[in-house]
Amino acid sequence: MATTGQPTTDATATLQDLAKRHLWMAFTRMGAYADAEVPVIVRGDGCYVWDEHGNRYLDGLSSLFCANLGHGRADIARAGAEQAERIDYFSTWSYAHPPAIELAAKLASLAPGDLNRVFFTSGGSESVESALKLARAYHKLTGHPNKTKVVAREIAYHGASLGALSATGIPALRTPFEPFTPGGVHVPSTNLYRRADGFDPLSLAEAVRDRILFEGPETVGAVIMEPVQNAGGCFTPPDGYFQRIREICDEFDVLMISDDVICSFGRLGTWFGAQRYDYVPDVITTAKGITGAIAPLGALIVSDRVAAPFMEGTEMFLHGFTFAGHPICATVALAAIDAYEREGILEHVRANEAPFRAMLESLRDIPIVGDVRGAGYFQAIELVKDRDTKETFDDDEAETLLRGFLSGELFRRGLVCRADDRGDPVIQLSPPLIAGPEQFAEIEAVLRPVLEEATRRMHLRGAVPRVGVRRA
């Protein structure tokens, strides 16, 4: 029994008291809440959420790139409750149940090419971890036991588990947990904003080939990439990039893993991001929007070729998670996919991508806005000190800008989004896929004054002074 820091048991304790004493939040500076309130979100409906004080916020991040169908979808949750009355849980370890079977078949029908085998997980990091283990096991079964290395991109985030973190290309996230399972190697991202004039974008694909040759093709088992890279701020691929990556993987017998955890289920206007950019990987990792965030679920979708060695004789993929393919979660996913289809969600994203992007592009007249990029409902604004030279902020300046002002001010004004500096400072916007022009106007109504104030606070050239305030 603990002798210090006793649990909060007072019946009058508030949610704030209990949160500060007992809740350990992910990727959170817990000390920041010593003298500040924890944002406690108690209700959601459509594109909006409300906190415990009744304040309304536009969820411009789909919570964490996953509430694709909006909040308050009791109809989808109800399907899970009804499933619980039939069979609440049974394992997919050597057993099957109807929701897992039906969902696997549905995912195979939506995936590109011959990706027909579905292995369930409980979320995105688990999906990536499973894909990396699958790559190793596949190459051992096919007579290439030394093909253990994984090529990923710099700054890219692929998950928080140790295996997935070995592929993640963000030093600050890696350092506290080193050493990792060896094998993660990195190549440049497709950040075209930071490339010199005359740069050949397809040389970024050739960098993958060069890295494989440097490491030794006999040692490289997989290449893992997001269709649009999240960390760093929505880096899109140049034309032909993924087609060339596919050719390079085929040349060296390397598995191509498309990390679609964020980019699938309509985020880019297609079922999977690979379809947006017209390539067929060997493995797709997915999660997040698969259930509209109404239940936790992830999956690997694997080509027949890669699955084949595990389907013979006594072979098996020695891997699994207790709650992977949970009957309730799988049923919720089926109901969510039905909603995507019935409500024309993918078509809605494709129809509204241009006005969403146009709204963000209209902010380029603000001096701190350096670049606007992304695809579908997955967009980012890069913030710079000097738009002409593309000079970025140093670490102290980024801390002041993002955490000292932008994050809190955007939320205070009613917008949930991400102010991030895992690469250069960006604001990311990824609203529910049901959002439209009304929500875009609300986002602009918050972003414009906040970015103008940020320009003034950072003393940038071209800043417009407030009335009665002398230009710095």
Image (cartoon, rainbow, N blue to C red):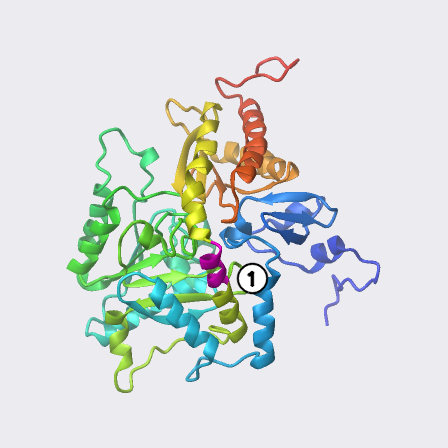
Residue at 51% x, 31% y is 397
Tell whether 89 sits left or right of 423: right
The foreground one among 438 and 378 is 438
Query: Is residue 339 rendered magenta in the image?
Result: yes
The quarter in which the C terminus is drawn is top right
Tell whether 215 sits left or right of 345: left
Query: Is residue 418 rendered magenta in the image?
Result: no
Label 1, residues with CA under 10 Å away: few <14, some 14-19, many ≥20? many
- Image x and y of residue 372, in percent: 41, 34
- Image x and y of residue 49, in percent: 64, 49
| Circle 1 residue | 294
Badge 1 element: loop
The quarter in which the N terminus is drawn is bottom right
- Image x and y of residue 186, in percent: 30, 51
Residue at 40% x, 65% y is 129
Residue at 61% x, 56% y is 25
Residue 140 location, quadrant = bottom left
Write the start and end of the magenta stretch as one range: 336-343
